[in-house]
Amino acid sequence: MNWKELGGTIADMGADLLGEALPFPGAGAAVDALAAAFGGERDPDRIAEAVKADPKAAAKLREIESEHESALAREISRRQSAVNETIQAGYRQGVLWRRAVGWSLAVVAPAVIIGGLGLGAYAVSTGQPGLIKHIPSVVEATAPVWYVYLTTLGIAGYQEGRLGRALAGDKGGGGGVAAALQALRGSGGKEG
């Protein structure tokens, strides 16, 4: 079990604030209080076992939470502010080309649509309806451009998200399929 899972278990037992504080680095006061109440070890597996074995665990958890409520709330708030500032700083430093591709797509897409409509209007106004049958071919000829744009935007979005998570202090190891499966299961790497 990791700190995030333990935090979820504790939140499910009615100590939401305490559970929310656990998965994050720097949750020392919360971990110390839990360790003191449930066996003295700062190990999520040992604490989880002790919590499961203790019939009065829910009451103890709520008591720990009420004793440390203001400190836990301050820590969570401070951490969220730090994460937000870090992410904002990272995005301000972000790679310009990613944003340039996004904005250029916002310009090119309407230009292609207007171009297609313009070609149709030109064909009608000049009395050359045969040109209209070529509009799908012209639009289809731009398909590689769309593939490049969409692939680039997908990669850029992935990198932006990865950068944001890294700047936020996410130390979740691995990537690709393993990370996707962890995200689907709602589990992360050991933290704490």
Image (tube, grey):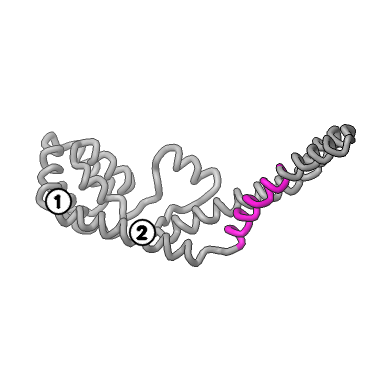
Most foreground residue, 141 or 21:
141
Q: Taking 90 as reference, is 104 left or right?
A: right
Most foreground residue, 182 or 88:
88
Name the spot of residue 97 as percent of width and height, x first. Answer: 61, 62
Amino acid of disc 2: Val
Name the spot of residue 187 as percent of width and height, x first. Answer: 39, 43
Q: CA distance from mark 1 to mark 2?
A: 21 Å
Q: Residues within 10 Å of mark 2 (few under 14, many from 20)?
A: some
Residue 107 among magenta residues: yes
Residue plotted at (29% across, 58% down): 79
Q: Which residue in the structure is indicated by mark 1?
A: 69
Name the spot of residue 118 as percent of width and height, x first. Answer: 77, 42
Q: Secondary structure at mark 2?
A: helix
Name the image quarter holding the C terminus.
bottom left
Magenta segment, which residues? 97-113
Instruction: Return the mark for residue 83.
Output: 2
Is 25 above or below relative to 18?
below
Name the image quarter holding the N terminus.
top left
Residue plotted at (24% across, 42% down): 48
Mark before the other along the chain sequence, 1 or 2? 1
Q: Taking 160 as reference, is 88 left or right?
A: left
